[in-house]
Image (cartoon, rainbow, N blue to C red):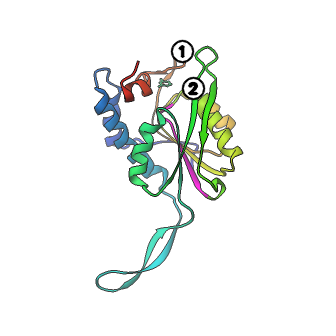
C-alpha cells in the first residue's frame, strides 16, 4: 500500500469543492463531510481480510464471505475528527470507537493532549485514525505516538485534505501508516492553515468561530 493515497473519485472531488466554498452553510458542510468520509473509508478498507462462514439463504446453504478478525477500532482526533467518524461509523457500524483530545498551541503549533480513551486489544485490530486536516502533522503524529504506546500495530489515517508539509512529516515519523485523503493541497500559511484549504474544519462543522 502507498504511503499517500489520494482518492480522486469524481463524487469526492465534487463534494469537496462544495465544502471548500466560503458560503456553504454548516449543515451542508457536515453532511458533505459525512458522505466523503464514507467514500474514503470504502477505499481505506478495501484490503480488509475475509474469512468464510456457512449460511443458509432461502434457497440453499453456502459458504459466504465475512470480515475476519477483531472489530476495527476507529479513533477520532477531537474535535473535527468527529465529522469524519460519523460517516465511517455508518459504513462500519460494529467498529469500536476511541477519542484522542488534542489542542493546537497557537504559538508553537504543537499538539497538547487533554483526553485519551481507546478500545481494548488495539494490537489485534486494524486501527483507523480520522481527522479532516493534515496540516503541520503535529496532532496526528502525537495521536499516532499515543496509539502505538497503547499497542496499536496496524494503523491507517483518513483525512479530507492534506498539505505537503504534513504529509512529509508524517511519512518521516510514521512511515508504516498509510494516509487516505481526498486532496493534496498547495501549502500551509504562516498560521499553519492549509491553502487553498477550506478554513477551520472544526468551526465550519460546528458553526463556531
Ligand atoms: N486545521 C484546520 O481546521 N484547517 C486548516 O487549514 C489547518 C488545520
- Distance, label 1 to label 2, CA atoms, is 14 Å
User: In the image, which disc is placed on residue 103?
Assistant: 2
How many residues crowd mark 2 within 10 Å: few (<14), some (14–19), many (20+)?
Answer: some
Q: Is residue 168 visible?
A: no
How many residues crowd mark 1 within 10 Å: few (<14), some (14–19), many (20+)?
Answer: few
Q: Residue at x 40, y 41 (%)?
A: 8
Q: Is residue 150 left or right of residue 80?
A: right
Q: Is residue 70 left or right of residue 20?
A: right
Q: Position of residue 17 (x, y in %)?
A: 33, 30
Q: Position of residue 94 (x, y in %)?
A: 46, 58
Q: In which quadrant of the rendered image does the C terminus lie?
A: top left
Is residue 191 located in the magenta-colored stretch of the structure? no
In front: mark 1 or mark 2? Answer: 2
Looking at the rendering, the stretch of residues picked out in magenta corresponds to 125-133
Q: Residue at x 42, y 50 (%)?
A: 89
Q: Position of residue 51 (x, y in %)?
A: 52, 72
Residue nearest the viewer, comparing 166 with 84: 84
Is residue 129 located in the magenta-colored stretch of the structure? yes
Q: Secondary structure at mark 2?
A: strand
User: In the image, which disc is placed on residue 191?
Assistant: 1
Q: Residue at x 47, y 27 (%)?
A: 185
Q: Quick one: which residue is furthest to the right in this view?
A: 149
Amino acid at each position: 500500500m502507498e504511503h499517500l493515497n489520494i482518492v480522486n473519485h469524481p463524487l469526492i472531488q465534487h463534494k469537496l469543492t462544495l465544502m471548500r466554498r466560503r458560503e456553504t452553510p454548516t449543515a451542508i458542510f457536515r453532511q458533505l463531510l459525512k458522505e466523503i468520509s464514507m467514500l474514503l473509508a470504502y477505499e481505506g478498507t478495501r484490503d480488509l481480510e475475509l474469512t468464510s462462514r456457512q449460511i443458509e439463504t432461502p434457497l440453499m446453504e453456502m459458504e459466504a464471505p465475512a470480515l475476519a478478525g477483531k472489530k476495527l477500532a476507529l479513533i477520532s482526533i477531537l474535535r473535527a475528527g468527529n465529522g469524519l467518524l460519523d460517516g465511517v461509523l455508518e459504513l462500519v457500524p460494529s467498529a469500536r470507537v476511541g477519542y484522542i483530545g488534542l489542542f493546537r498551541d497557537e504559538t508553537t503549533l504543537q499538539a497538547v493532549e487533554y483526553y485519551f480513551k481507546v478500545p481494548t486489544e488495539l494490537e489485534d485490530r486494524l486501527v483507523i485514525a480520522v481527522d479532516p486536516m493534515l496540516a503541520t502533522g503535529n496532532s496526528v503524529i502525537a495521536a499516532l505516538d499515543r496509539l502505538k504506546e497503547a499497542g496499536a500495530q496496524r494503523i491507517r489515517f483518513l483525512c479530507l485534505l492534506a498539505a505537503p508539509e504534513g504529509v512529509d512529516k508524517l511519512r518521516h515519523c510514521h512511515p508504516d501508516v498509510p494516509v487516505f485523503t481526498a486532496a493534496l493541497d498547495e501549502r500551509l500559511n504562516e498560521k499553519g492553515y492549509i491553502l487553498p484549504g477550506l478554513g477551520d474544519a472544526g468551526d465550519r462543522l460546528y458553526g463556531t468561530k
